Image: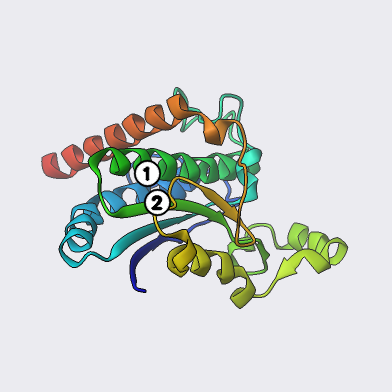
Amino acid sequence: MHFLFFRNNAGIMFCPYDLSEDGFEIQFATNHIGHFHLTNLLLEKIKQTAKSTGIEGRIVNLSSVAHIHTYSGGIKFENINDERSYCDKRSYGQSKLANILHATELSRRLQAEGANVTVNSVHPGLIMTNLFKHSGFLMKILKFSTGILWKNVPQGAATTCYVALHPSLKCVTGKYFVDCNEFKPSAYARDEILAKRLWDFSNKIINAAEIDVKVS
């Protein structure tokens, strides 16, 4: 059995406050908006290919258990770029929450269209990679005290590969997976209204950025 899959994987974590070139908080911009925009750019091609070949398309968003540790309300829509209220840990959690909300809302929309494409999100686990470059000392302490829980890179890729390729997940969509098992995410991550609001908010950001590029 074959699947056509696309993975939103790139990210940054626990960064000092900064803004992207488009003027948005850097973790939210990199971990969510970049993936949201790239997915939108490729989505019609994925849907058309899935339809013409009969091969199920699969989109996988890499989230994190850190989505639980976010700001009050889940997403700071009204002051997403506020430096005074910025917390590097909560901002990372906010971006990882956005990954799940993006997956569930896109899944809902594709199901409504009858598209042969599924969208799920995963927590890959605790993996020591360059993602920790802004908090190396903290991560060394955590790894020393919780070493048995940490994974190497191949182990960390297992859940992503499972969700992207396993035949048993055919037509399974809008779910969150941990250690190759479906897992119940936070209440914010299950909030359909929040997911729809994030979708509209993200589109507004993308549209505004495109207008700025055309004007300049």
Crowd around label 2: few <14 · some 14–19 · many ≥20 (10 Å):
many
* Spot occupied by residue 179 in the image (x, y as percentages of width and height): 64, 61
Residue for badge 1 = 107
Amino acid identity at mark 1: Ser
* Spot occupied by residue 23 in the image (x, y as percentages of width and height): 36, 40
Camera-side residue of 169 and 133: 169
Left or right: residue 208 compared with residue 181: left
Mark-to-mark CA distance, 1 and 2? 5 Å
Locate the C terminus and report the quarter of the image it occupies: top left
Place residue 127 in its image quadrant.
bottom right
* Spot occupied by residue 3 in the image (x, y as percentages of width and height): 34, 68
Q: How many marks?
A: 2
Residue for badge 2 = 119
Locate the N terminus and report the quarter of the image it occupies: bottom left
Amino acid identity at mark 2: Val
Coloring scheme used: rainbow
Cβ atoms at labels 1 and 2 below 8 Å apart: yes
Q: Is residue 113 above or below residue 145?
A: above
* Spot occupied by residue 83 in the image (x, y as percentages of width and height): 54, 33
Under tag 2, what secondary structure? strand
